[in-house]
Every structure is written in C-alpha cells, then in structure tokens.
Amino acid sequence: MNHQLQAILLKAKEDVYTRLSGGNLSRILGQGYDFAELREYASSDDIRHISWINSAKLGKPYVKKMYEERELRVAVCSMIDGRFLVGKKQETLSYLLAILGYSAYKANDLFSAFLVIGNQVQRYEATKNIHLIEKSIKESYNVKLLGTRVAYTQITNIYLESKSLLFLIGDFLNDIDLSLVAQQHEVVLIIIRDASEENPILSAEYQLMNPQTNQPINQTVTKRAIKYYKSKLAEHDARLIQQCHQYGIRYSKIYGSDEVLEKLEHLF
C-alpha cells in the first residue's frame, strides 16, 4: 500500500475512535425506548401502542409513540477528475472518505460508495465489512485522474435501494442539477477546493495547464482576467448554494484535510 495512503487511513481511524463522539443520531418514529409524542388514537394505530394510563386520565384512547434507533444507510459519491490533482485535493478526499467509512463502521451502519470519473461510474455495494470499505477508499486514491473530465449528469445514474444519507463530494466547479437526488435521499454536499482555485496568483513563472485535458493553456493571465474569473466563480457558487437552500441540502466547503473533522461536526 502507498505509504501516504496508509498514513491517511491510520490518521482517520485514530480520529474517528478518539476525537469523534456519539453514535447513530438518526431517529425514526417506531417501536423503541425514547418518548416521541402522545396523541389521540387513530384507526390505523396498533392497539399495542395505546397508553392505558393516559387514556384513563384523558377519558379517550391515546397512543404513545416512541423513537427507535435504526441503522443508517450511508452512501458516498465522489465526483472527481483531473482538477483533483491541484494542490492536495485528492489527499483531502481520501481522508474525508476514510472518516466517513470508519464512522459508518463504528456505528454499525451500511456503507456504500460510488466513484464517478468522466462518464464512468464505479459502484461499491453496501457493506459493513471494513476491508471492503477500505478497498473503495484505496481505489479512489489510486485512480489516474490526469486528462479526465467529470460528467455531473452521471448523478442521475446513482441508484440506491432505499433512502440513504448521501454525501456528494467534488469541487463542483461546473453546474450540477441536484433536484432529483435531493428528492430521493438526504443529501450532504461537500465541496473540496484548493485555495489557489478561488484566489489565483498572478505570476509569469508558471505555465498554466488544464488538468482535465493535460494540455497547456496558451493565455496570458492578467489582473483583469483574474478579477473576471473570481466574479464568475462567485456567481457560480451562489447558484450552487441557492440549490442547497432550495432542496434542504446541508453543505460545506473544505480546503484541506485539517478542516474535515471540524466541518463535519458543524454539519451534524
């Protein structure tokens, strides 16, 4: 195994088991032990849920509904291409995937993964097997990205058997339609960027390359061009965040692996 990847996995495992607290926070109405609500009996209710003490006090039948903790179905979809070679984006992605994978394993939740590269979708079946979870992380780390361009339209081909907590991960520097996937799952959007992508530096010392095509960019970078680029990127991000608000999607932007834990904790 690549030594850098091994270090990422070890750090993520240690952080999950020592720094993250709490278990499965997903609560669904059902049979359980924590009180949810007391309400008047309806014909569709199970008579076993009738609270006879409260019914006697109130003069008519009432049912007591309880919260039940059930396992989460955690799914992660990484939408990556050549731009993830910029800075340490691929390293940040691997650490994030490891944190999510080990967290699901610790909570005994099902974990599934999708890797979208260009028009190809690699699917890893839902599992609680730590070796299979680590396999999906390793393969996302070792994939050859140079010259690839992700197709965000592939989001429509992400199929899960039942409603899941779905993490969509990418740099999202191109437009994506989140409407359909947000209807099907509880979506969390994680934007991974390098600081230089949002604040490029004007310098004659660098030859600009397009990592999606592996071709040089024969264009002079001026202060005016940078200003225009930043304004367009701000407009693009505003549209993306507007979608998140519209469809009730939680989101966060991460610039390095050192931010991952803090940003995830703020989300949940």
Image (spheres, rainbow, N blue to C red):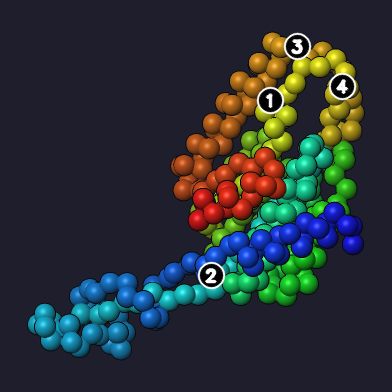
Q: Who's the residue at 24% across and 74% down the image?
A: 38
Q: Nearer the viewer, mark 3 or mark 2?
A: 2
Disc 2 residue type (three-letter): Gly
Q: CA distance from mark 3 to mark 2?
A: 51 Å
User: Element at badge 4?
Assistant: loop
Question: Where does label 2 land, which residue?
Answer: 23
Q: Amino acid at mark 1?
A: Asn
Which mark is drawn over residue 199? Answer: 1
Q: Which residue is mark 4?
A: 206
Report the quarter where the N terminus lies: bottom right
Residue 212 position, x and y percent, is: 83, 35
Q: Does residue 159 appear anywhere in the picture?
A: no
Residue at image point 32% right, 72% down: 36
* Vertical placement of residue 161 versus 53, above or below: above
Q: Nearer the N terminus, badge 3 or badge 2?
A: 2
Q: Is residue 246 visible?
A: yes
